Amino acid sequence: MGQDYYADLEVTRNAQDVEIKRAYRRLALKYHPHRNKESGAADKFRQVAEAYDVLSDPLKKGIYDKFGEDGLKGGIPPEFGSEAVWTEGYVFHGNAEKVFRGFFGGDNPFSEFFSSDGSEVNVSFGGLRGRGVKKQDPPIERDLYLSLEDLFYGCTKKIKISRRVMNDDRCSSTIRDKILTIDVQPGWRQGTRITFEKEGDQGPNVIPADIIFVVKEKLHPRFRREDDNLLFVSDIPLGKALIGCTVEVKTLDDRLLNIPINDIVHPKYVKLVPGEGMPLASDPAKRGDLYIFFDIRFPSRLTPAKKQLLRQALPT
């Protein structure tokens, strides 16, 4: 949703429902594309609709107030999610016009722009489509937040959308829910796009928009991903950096690796562990590599005796 949307609605965290509705009405009429032809107005209209979709729902608003946009769209952090109802990330359906119509009902302030069959009136200005000319709505893109575990194993995500569906008379329509199923494949990378063709709102003179989900990686407590490789940082004291040690790494599939470090670990030292990265999307049986970086802890102080021992042991 975004902090700027929230500010645009000009409501406080304790705002009553009537304030939210009043703010949405004012901004939706201000930025509606049939009224406001300025550059960016259509995008602002969609942003305001998304903000209203969240702020008018007590559950969504509560999650946004407590966890912010990351918690709303990426899912409640695991430490808070065990007792929570809403653990999957919020995805706006993307159709601002649906929110607009649902808010105003049959009393559409812009009804003069539509004919009796629901198609847009052909006028000589404003760029409206002529009656009977079908044009597909622009794609609706939404983020799909996934953990590294989801992308390591693969998983199935079910996302509920609400869309306008034409009735049998082909003139009237109804808002209906639909479940979209995404089969996440092992090794998918951030930026992978999943397209559901023509799953947007239906209309008598409209080709439904494609709905596109774009993979986003959630932050991980142990690893950072680069392409098909995993990066891990080990915290070791200076003594072990000099004389060697064993580094324990808990993998994404819950194995415990014991990696021997026999080299002297200097600030630029990196340990490569082949085949312990992410699965390759093209061949999940193969994996990238694991790179271990080191954060060397230096002692805060040394006694004179220890300093003397170090002088004897190390070149100075």
Image (spheres, helix red, strand yellow):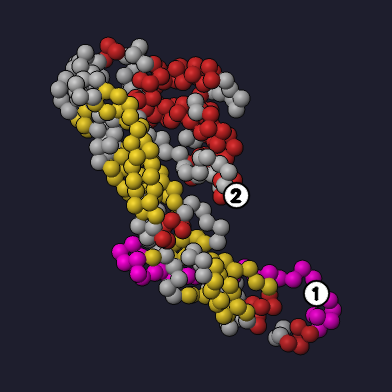
Amino acid type for the residue under numbered disc 2 = Glu
Q: Nearer the viewer, residue 264 or 162?
A: 162
Residue 282, placed above or below residue 239: above
The image shows residue 48 at horizontal and vertical percentages of 44, 27
The residue that appears at 48% across and 51% down in the rendered structure is 218
The image shows residue 253 at horizontal and vertical percentages of 48, 65
Amino acid type for the residue under numbered disc 1 = Leu
Query: What's the mark number on residue 302?
Result: 1
Which marked residue is nearer to the observer: mark 1 or mark 2?
2
Disc 2 target residue:
79
| Identity of the residue furthest to the bottom in this view | 312
Which of the 4 image quarters holds residue 285?
A: bottom left
Q: Is residue 302 magenta?
A: yes
Question: Crowding at label 1, few (<14), some or many (≥20) Cα neighbours within 10 Å?
Answer: few
Question: In the rendered structure, which segment of residues is drawn in magenta?
Answer: 280-308
Going by the image, does 33 lie left or right of 234? Answer: left
The residues bearing labels 1 and 2 have C-alpha atoms spaced at a distance of 40 Å
Q: Is residue 196 magenta?
A: no
Helix or strand or loop: what does disc 1 sit on? Answer: loop
